[in-house]
Image (cartoon, helix red, strand yellow):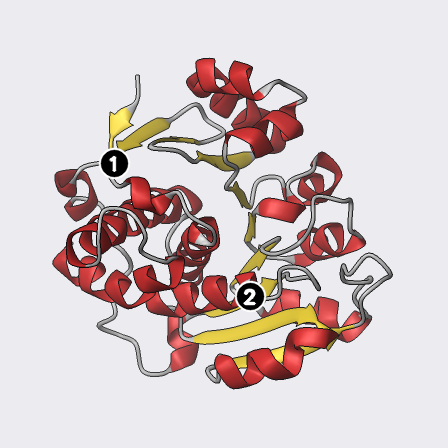
Amino acid sequence: MATRITRALLRGWPLPSDEDVRSKEDRGRVLVVGGSRQIPGAVTLAGEAALRAGAGKLMVVTGMDAASHLAVTLPEAAVVGVPLDETGEMRALDAAQVDLARQAGAVLVGPGMATARSPVSAQVARVATALVADAGSLHADALAPAAGRLIITPHIPEMADLMDLRPSDVARECVDVAKEAASRFGAVVVLKGPTTWIAAPDGTLWVHDIDAPGLGTSGSGDVLAGVVTGLVARGATLAQAAVWGVALHARAGVMASRQVGRLGFLARELLPRLPRVMDRL
């Protein structure tokens, strides 16, 4: 039996209080690892989303080709560039870069990365205190080291690849597949779609429905992953961050639908709406 995510549920499960916050360190440190030559902007969306969710400090590790530009366009972040390989993906991190993952309260890996088996995802998974895995990091060998401290955020085709199923099988059996993935990977699973299913390893299940088709757009998933990571950094549990992240992202989409248009708003237009939605809840 799934618990429906409602305003009443969220208000009865409040996010960590900001009453004792004295500095940005008290609000948590996020590290976003991702990007490639082909998709350099995904980490920008995810990183800003983490800050909009209330995280206090942001670090980004991305491809060297885009690092300087990213540091200017996202001045709130400390940015580290990594050499790219011949395919345009990041090469393995050095020891200092891996250590950034140890220092962070929450790490997001995968936005803008290809689904090829990069060594970066597993490097980060081995040392992160809490890991959110999205997009290019969604493969079993990258997830295994983070079991028990992991959130994964696949859409249906990504879940099909991860579980060696057909997308039609996942779409037909969303609940069972999400629960199986949560158990197999020791993860809180966010199976994204117009109806989003969230499954915890202990079998607890939540469901969220939204009528905002404009959320089905490039970069929207990067924003969701960033929000979830920012909430973890602030001190939310993995399950709470997943539930609240899905709700905040969806409600920002509804607000954008009303103010911009039902279709055609951009993922980056969700970002300034997130704090307002969070305040209302």
Q: Residue at x 78, y 61 (%)?
A: 88
Residue 53 visible in image: no
Q: Earlier in the sequence, mark 2 or mark 1?
A: 2
Q: Percent from the top left, x then y, of residue 110?
A: 62, 53
Q: Percent from the top left, x then y, of residue 229?
A: 46, 57
Q: State the CA–CA distance, disc 2 to disc 1.
A: 26 Å
Q: Is residue 153 above or below residue 23?
A: above
Q: Is residue 269 above or below residue 167?
A: below
Q: Nearer the viewer, mark 2 or mark 1?
A: 2
Q: Which mark is residue 161?
A: none
Query: Given the image, on which type of amino acid does mark 1 rest?
Result: Ile
**Residue 24 falls left or right of residue 162:** left
The N terminus sits in image quarter: top left
Question: Which residue is label 2 attached to?
Answer: 41
Q: Residue at x 51, y 29 (%)?
A: 156
Question: Which residue is label 1 attached to?
Answer: 210
The C terminus sits in image quarter: bottom left
Density class for disc 1 (Cα within 10 Å; few <14, some 14-19, many ≥20) is: some
Q: Percent from the top left, x then y, of residue 192?
A: 43, 36
Toward the viewer: 200 or 175?
Answer: 175
